Image: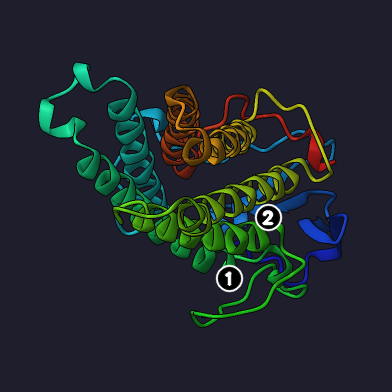
Amino acid sequence: MHNVVNTLRTQLHHTAGVFTTRVVQHLRDGRRLVFLSRRVRKALPPLHLASDGSEIAAARVANPWLQLWAPRRLSWWIAVLFICGSACFAVGSFAANWPQQLPAWLGVGSVINGVFFVGSLFFTGAAWLQLLEAINGDVADIAVSTGAEARSWRWFSWKPHNAGYSASLVQLVGTLLFNFNTGDAMITGLAWADEELLVWAPDVIGSLCFLVASYLGLLEVSHRFWSWQPRQLSWWIVLLNMLGSIAFMAAAVFAFFVPATGNPDWLWGANFFTLIGALCFLLASYLLLPELFGAEAKPGAVSACR
């Protein structure tokens, strides 16, 4: 971490609503260190700005888009688990709508439900690690005196003013609800009311949690309630998560009418939107890997930090 002892002039905390999303350290020589909430959470270094506001380029990993192996970093495990979970949901929903395109055993209802359940477990594992990442990587913990201070690992904490923490906590609740949703779906012979209570209710509430979490992630990256940053990798990650959450919510709406009407079109629609959402999450999960290695669509884009 950067040692700015005896060189730090001021430190400013910038907020979006109630959330602290970045900390800017103004050094005596005019340079600035910009600690962004998401970058701190991902254990990435701060942005280093010269006195004229231009970014001082940091050392970068060669070909970050092709880097796939970093098992000693928590963010890597988060990405891998989200990739596995998204892939399971994509396979399950595709198999449900187009079983003729896959091996016969994969088109069996019990197998499809099992694939969804396994995917939900991957999601929960990733969400739990993501929460730990947020607990131990809070931008508000940046110390005034040194720019950073060593802290012991924490398993639990309450950080309501950290957007990344709030997003991770809400998403963890959503994944746990998906565990119930997909697990209960494997129970056969449920009455209509039981199916709505045990399968649909956790589905729609879990989808709502994902939607809230994805917006909080967008707020964290935007440093305000909305932004347009198509040249920033982190912005694309949270936007894809938002689109995936919207698709999951649409799938939950379609699923509500399946038991009541028995119309296969509603079931097809639910699986279709689940597939769209899973593909969005899958792409966003992959993009976590190049982000981990410092990739940005436009390395010098720091206008939001000024």
Instruction: Name the residue rendered at 60%, 54% in the picture.
Output: 205
Residue 17 appears left or right of 137: right
Kind of residue sitting beneath label 1: Ile
Relative placement, left or right, of 78 versus 115 is right
- Point out residue 270 in the picture as x, y percentages from the top left corner: 48, 31
Q: Is residue 50 left or right of residue 46?
A: right
Residue 171 position in % (x across, y down): 57, 56
Q: Position of residue 290 (x, y in %)?
A: 44, 36
Amino acid type, residue under disc 2 in the picture: Ser
Give 128 or 274, whichever is nearer the viewer: 274
Q: Earlier in the sequence, mark 2 or mark 1?
A: 2
Q: Which residue is mark 1?
A: 135
* Disc 1 packing (10 Å; few <14; some 14–19; many ≥20): many
Q: Which mark is residue 37?
A: 2
Q: Quadrant of the N terminus?
A: bottom right
Question: Which residue is pictured at 32% across the width and 59% down the height?
Answer: 72
Residue at 79% in and 60% down: 20
Compared to residue 160, the image places residue 44 above or below, namely: above
